Amino acid sequence: MLGLPQGLEDSVDLTVIVLNWNTRNDLRACLASLVGQQHEHAIEVIVADNASADGSREMVAAEFPQVRLVVHSQNLGFCAGNNRAVPDNPGRYVLFLNADTRVTHCALDTLIRFADEHPDAGIVGPRLLNLDGSLQYSCRRFPNLGVGFFRNTLLGRLFPRNRFTQDYLMADWDHSTPRDVDWVSGAALLIRREVLRATGGFDEGFYMYCEDVDLCYRVHELGWRVMYCPAAVIYHAIGRSSDQVPTRATYAFHRSMYRFYRKHYARKTPWFVRPLILPGLVLRASGQIVRYRWRNLKRRWAQRRKH
């Protein structure tokens, strides 16, 4: 059952929030994957549009009349864009879903059944696959200083299979069995309604990135489990929205990393390491932005030479 049956607002099992910003074609494919199948449970779908200018809203209204549309007057980012689209009386579960995803047959029903079978699970994440069918490491361990050092310096490139990165990605496990995890990706994150209310949803101090890590961290602190359900499969074309503005995305990513560190790890970090965190993140972000701009400059120069 899809949509909100008249008079049955309190019987909705799952509210799906699909956040969109100028990804009309991806959004169309995502919604088609949702409405193109029969569901065992009562499911409502809400598109939260972050002031898109590509005709996304018109497409939803014309092609998916059974989908509710929430239009934000400006781009609120990932956290606020999702939070402010949650209705006052959502379903028993809320699934935050990226517009660049494709939901496979029975994936939503599988997630709901799994959550029902694990009443102490506050958050459940599905198995995410790249469009070519390869695995995305969508559930991971919480980061630590070793992970930050190897993933944010040249050492990570020199030693890509170092034990810190492998442990962080949970690469010693094939991701084919359900289990407890530290955190799951916000690209497809199911949260129990009472847990959503207890946490207040995503921390809007994170514009984008690390918000899923932070939410799962807080859910653990409240005594709930975070679990991974590989039987529910969703395809994810990672980074479609952020790729539109790579320099802004790079800034937002590193800013969010620092916010997460300050919020949860600063007091646990040795005093002699603390002064190195911010300069290290600034240096890494600056290097990435310079590389983006250099590649863009070379591409434009090559195009001019052709003409």
Image: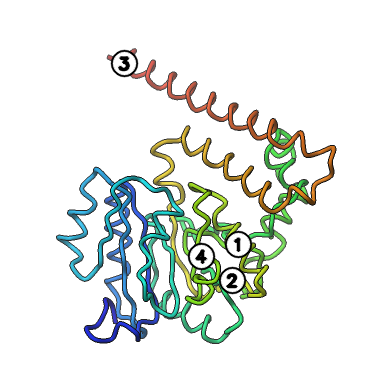
Q: Which residue is mark 2?
A: 228
Going from the N terminus, do you reach mark 1 or mark 3 first?
1
Q: Position of residue 206 (x, y in %)?
A: 52, 49
- Which label is found at residue 306? 3
Q: Which residue is mark 1?
A: 139
Nearest the eye: 55 or 198: 198
User: What is the distance, in whole Å, between disc 2 and disc 4 at their CAs?
Assistant: 22 Å
Q: Residue furthest left?
A: 62
Pointer 2: residues within 10 angstroms few (<14), some, or many (20+)?
many
Quarter holding the N terminus is: bottom left
> Is mark 1 in CB contact (under 8 Å) with mark 4?
no
Nearest the eye: 249 or 297: 249
Going from the N terminus, do you reach mark 1 or mark 2 first?
1
Q: Position of residue 50 (x, y in %)?
A: 33, 50
User: What is the distance, in whole Å, between disc 3 and disc 2 at their CAs?
Assistant: 50 Å
Q: Which residue is mark 4?
A: 200
The three-letter amino acid code for the residue at tag 3 is Lys
Instruction: Report whether 133 appears left or right of 156.
Output: left
**Which tag is nearer the camera, tag 1 or tag 4?**
4
Vertical position of residue 92 compared to residue 207: above or below: below
Q: How was the colour assigned to the protein in this rendering?
A: rainbow
> Is mark 1 in CB contact (under 8 Å) with mark 2?
yes
**Which tag is nearer the camera, tag 1 or tag 3?**
1
Q: Position of residue 88 (x, y in %)?
A: 36, 72
Instruction: Report whether 102 appears left or right of 190.
Output: left
